[in-house]
Image (spheres, helix red, strand yellow):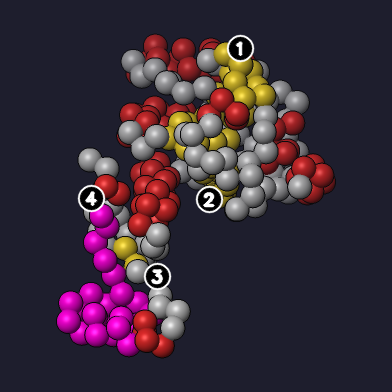
Amino acid sequence: MDYEIMMNGTVKIGQRAPEFEAVTTMGSISLNDYKGKWVVLFSHPGDFTPVCTTEMISFARANTYFENMNTCLIGLSVDSNASHLAWVYDIYCRTGIRIPFPIIADRNGEIARKYGMISNDVSNTETVRNVYIIDDKGIVRTILIYPMNIGRFIPEIARIVQALQMADCTNASTPANWIPNQPVIVSPPHTFSELEARNQEIESNRNGISWYLSFKNPDNNCIRD
């Protein structure tokens, strides 16, 4: 798997996230440090740039919300650590907002290329806006890629984390436009007798449209306050 990652420069959903060690604005870290935590690893094209600045501020404002979901934010670009520090200090001086998560200084692009964050058709050096949601077992669960000139919608990234955690907890799926505290989709039946029972349940509870699509409210232990 590691050889495939090195050659293709891509990471796929369902595979173990590639390990890394890195210098950041909060000291040296490794992905292994985050065992038992969910991680949102995201790249940005460059420090002291307008879209990236708005994203850092938005991620910072949402950091507590992510922490409440047992989720840690990690930023990355190919800028130096000195540049990162100057940038986050400038943001703090101008807005009063501290960036409460580490930003990786990936000067040689090793981590960026390992994760496929550099699109050669766009830039040979700068990263595009990638997002990797990694679960508490170190598995890549979601990959989002945005162009350089379009800022990310941070609430959607948080919603995806919540949807993944809800789906895991309930052994179910989430429907289109799902938001927290809404019903989830029940796993479909696997036998004809289960199918008949499911249709009877739907007729009685009016909780679906057919045996292959029905809903349930999540258990209380799956709902975060």
Residue 92 in sight: yes
Is the residue 6 above or below the residue 29 in the image?
Answer: below
Q: How dense is the environment of label 1, judged by Cα within 10 Å: few (below 14), some, or many (20 and up)? A: few
Residue tagged 1: 82
Q: Residue 220 has which mark?
A: 4
Query: Can you tell which mark lies on residue 142?
Result: 2
> Gap in Å between the C-alphas at discs 1 and 4?
46 Å
Q: Earlier in the sequence, mark 3 or mark 1?
A: 1
Spatial separation of the CA atoms under disc 4 and disc 3: 19 Å
Residue 177 in sight: no
The mark found on residue 74 in the picture is none
Q: Secondary structure at mark 4?
A: helix
Q: Nearer the viewer, mark 4 or mark 2?
A: 4
Q: What amino acid is labelled 2 in the image? A: Thr
Q: Secondary structure at mark 1?
A: helix
Horizontal relation, residue 27 to residue 65: left or right? right
Q: Residues within 10 Å of mark 3 (few under 14, many from 20)?
A: some
Q: Position of residue 53 (x, y in %)?
A: 47, 28
- Up-down: is 215 above or below 51? below
Which residues are drawn in magenta?
Answer: 196-220
Q: Name the residue located 42 percent from the left edge and 53 percent from the top edge.
A: 168
Q: Position of residue 107 (x, y in %)?
A: 71, 23
Q: Amino acid at mark 3?
A: Ser
Q: Is residue 77 left or right of residue 204?
A: right
